[in-house]
């Protein structure tokens, strides 16, 4: 049962059920889309799992990105399910659970890549893969009914920074033994060729640091510890001190260092308050904000409101990331602001400073060829990506009837001989707004959308014995500037008075009907005068 991750990038979650036992793979969140005003994050729908809590035996995680672990605390508040993950991934999960005060009750099991764990009738093997975060794994899920190979997020890097190459030999061996279903990452299926090696980015850093007399500020995804390691290595070679800036970057560096995934030379990293002791040419700042987020560290620098870092002509800023789809405009705005402040800004269009963590078409072909599945379902991608991945599998000789493009909530039945949809479960996105989880729905979002586009028009009237004795008083927000719209406001008051008089003549005393008549009359008047449709809110008060 795919609960999230199909037709979208984010909130990845899939449930596998065999003989009244459920194993969940990944539990991610998604950042809000345009139009989700005020929403902090989007979670998968846990309702089926909560209803069948007694069946849920384990949560198995492929890697530590937010779109795979971000929703874990919310699930654990509903079901205290045991978690299985690799060492670095578990370190990130632990930090998240500590923030939510769940660490003491969570059941956690660290599994190394290359090992297999038995959970009821499930045997799950962890297979090392390369990705833009350390300790990522694919999963081979074996049951008496069928075997599933789930790639998780991956790429094929023959020269990784940590020297640990994707275990293609084991993947081929599993393919030779027989795989019934392949679930494969579709994120980069639109791109030809190979994703490229992470180690190539290190060479670019050396070139950019060589002879540079300015302060260097590097922003990248905090989770990409191999990228951070390469910046640290380059800083050490050129005798620059390193400052770690930004909450998520500080957390990631702390976790990675404690667990042995980052090697930081002694006395290389300094506190941000010590920067004034050094010349610009002696400093490197590794910071958050590669996606143009205005509240992240780089965004605050660009807007001139960072407490310790002010940007000027003595700065070289390296944006070592590509914009996530939807963030292109924000990133461009940040770059423009940094350039206006006098900084030299280097980004992906001008230097080889980023490579994707997701497999491109040639890498996907290798996995399909090695796994040799009977059935295939593309995952982790928007609708066009899933379709292109299905076409790619077919071009490799796979029968079209064995390829299924599905949607979140589809219940698929798998055996050695067939793979078909048999039912549906609820898989609607669950919205998080502050402390509220799932209490914001489409009606509230539509109201927020209307408020953002057309503003608010409030009419307050005091009533006594069914008649207006005071008002109407009008308050407008986001619609017109009242001091300069006296004629419009007076006309609106006259419209309301006329509607009230009509109700009085008809002997209407029901407040609901009176409000409705006022709304209708005001809507027509305001649209005629302005061609706009503000949210109209009549307020009646008893004297």
Image: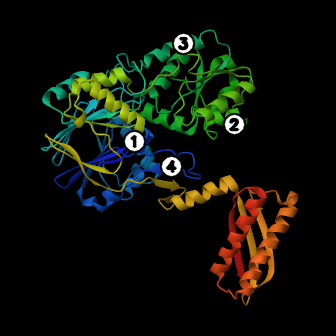
Residue depicted at x 33% and y 41%: 61
- Residue that numbered label 3 is attached to: 206
Question: Which of 229 and 166 lies nearest the eye of the viewer?
Answer: 166
On the image, numbered disc 2 is attached to which residue? 306
Residue that appears at 71% across and 73% down = 518
- Distance (Cα) linking label 2 and label 4: 25 Å
Task: Choose the circle earlier in sequence order: 4 or 1.
Answer: 4
Q: Position of residue 67 (x, y in %)?
A: 43, 41
Whichever of labels 3 and 4 marks the residue nearer the N terminus, that label is 4
Q: Of label 2 and label 4, which has the lower sequence position?
A: 4
Figure quadrant of residue 77: bottom left
State which quadrant residue 132 falls in.
top left
Q: Nearer the viewer, residue 413 or 171?
A: 413
Residue at 39 percent across and 24 percent down: it is 360
C-alpha distance separating marks 3 and 4:
37 Å
Question: In the displayed image of the protein, which residue is found farthest to the bottom?
Answer: 465
* Position of residue 210 measured from the top left corner of the image (x, y, whole percent): 59, 10
In this rendering, which labeled residue sits more in front, label 2 or label 4? 4
Left or right: 54, with 494 as reference point = left
Quarter of the image for the C terminus: give it. Answer: bottom right
Contact between labelled residues 2 and 3, with CB atoms less than 8 Å apart: no
Measured as percent of width and height from the top left, residue 432 is found at: 50, 54
In the rendered structure, which disc, 3 or 1, sits on the residue that comes first in sequence?
A: 1
As displayed, is residue 180 above or below residue 47?
above
Q: Which mark is residue 68?
A: 1
Assess whether mark 1 and mark 4 are in contact (beta carbons under 8 angstroms). no
**Residue 41, label in figure:** 4
CA neighbours of label 1 inside 10 A, class few (<14), some (14 to 19), many (20+): many
For residue 55, what is the image quadrant?
bottom left
Rounded to the nearest angstrom, the CA distance separating label 3 from label 2 is 28 Å
Q: Nearer the viewer, mark 3 or mark 1?
A: 1
Which mark sits nearer the N-terminus, 2 or 1?
A: 1
């Amino acid at each position: 049962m795919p609960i999230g991750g199909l037709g979208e990038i984010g909130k990845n979650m899939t449930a596998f059920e065999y003989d009244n036992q459920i194993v969940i793979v990944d539990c991610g969140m998604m950042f809000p889309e345009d139009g989700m005003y005020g929403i902090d994050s989007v979670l998968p729908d846990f309702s089926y799992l909560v209803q069948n809590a007694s069946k849920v035996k384990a949560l198995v995680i492929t890697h530590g990105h937010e779109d795979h672990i971000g929703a874990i605390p919310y699930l654990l508040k509903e079901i205290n399910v045991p978690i299985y993950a690799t060492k670095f991934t578990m370190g990130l999960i632990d930090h998240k659970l500590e923030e939510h005060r769940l660490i003491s009750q969570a059941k956690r099991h660290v599994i190394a890549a290359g090992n297999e764990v038995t959970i009821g009738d499930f045997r799950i093997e962890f297979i090392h893969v390369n990705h833009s975060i350390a300790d990522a794994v694919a999963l081979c899920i074996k049951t008496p009914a069928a075997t599933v190979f789930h790639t998780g997020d991956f790429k094929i890097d023959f020269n990784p920074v940590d020297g640990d190459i994707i275990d293609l030999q084991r993947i081929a061996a599993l393919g030779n033994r027989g795989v019934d279903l392949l679930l494969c990452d579709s994120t980069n299926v639109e791109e030809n060729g190979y994703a490229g090696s992470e180690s190539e980015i290190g060479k670019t850093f050396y070139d950019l640091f060589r002879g540079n007399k300015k302060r260097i500020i590097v922003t990248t995804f905090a989770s990409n510890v191999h990228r951070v390691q390469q910046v640290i290595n380059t800083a050490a070679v050129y005798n620059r001190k390193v400052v770690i800036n930004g909450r998520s970057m500080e957390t990631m560096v702390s976790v990675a260092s404690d667990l042995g995934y980052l090697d930081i030379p002694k006395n290389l990293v300094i506190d941000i308050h010590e920067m004034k002791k050094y010349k610009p040419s002696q400093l490197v700042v590794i910071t958050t904000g590669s996606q143009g987020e205005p509240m992240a560290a780089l965004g605050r620098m660009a807007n001139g409101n960072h407490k310790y870092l002010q940007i000027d002509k003595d700065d070289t800023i390296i944006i070592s990331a590509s914009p996530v789809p939807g963030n292109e405009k924000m990133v461009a705005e940040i770059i423009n602001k940094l350039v206006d402040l006098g900084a030299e800004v280097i980004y992906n269009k001008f230097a080889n400073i980023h490579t994707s963590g997701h497999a491109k078409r040639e890498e996907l072909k290798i996995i399909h060829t090695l796994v040799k599945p009977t059935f295939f379902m593309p995952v982790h991608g928007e609708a066009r990506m899933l379709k292109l991945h299905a076409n790619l599998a077919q071009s490799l000789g796979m029968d079209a009837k064995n390829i299924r493009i599905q949607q979140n909530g589809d219940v698929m039945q798998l055996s050695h001989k067939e793979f078909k949809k048999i039912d549906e479960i609820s898989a609607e996105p669950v919205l998080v707004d502050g402390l509220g989880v799932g209490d914001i729905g489409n009606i509230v979002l539509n109201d927020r959308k209307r408020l953002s586009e057309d503003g608010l028009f409030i009419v307050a009237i005091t009533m006594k014995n069914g008649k207006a004795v005071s008002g109407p008083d009008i308050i407008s927000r986001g619609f017109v500037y009242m001091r300069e719209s006296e004629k419009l406001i007076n006309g609106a008051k006259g419209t309301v008075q006329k509607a009230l008089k009509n109700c009085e003549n008809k002997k209407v005393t029901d407040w609901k009907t009176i409000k409705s008549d006022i709304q209708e009359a005001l809507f027509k008047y305001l649209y005629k005068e302005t061609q706009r449709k503000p949210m109209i809110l009549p307020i009646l008060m008893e004297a």
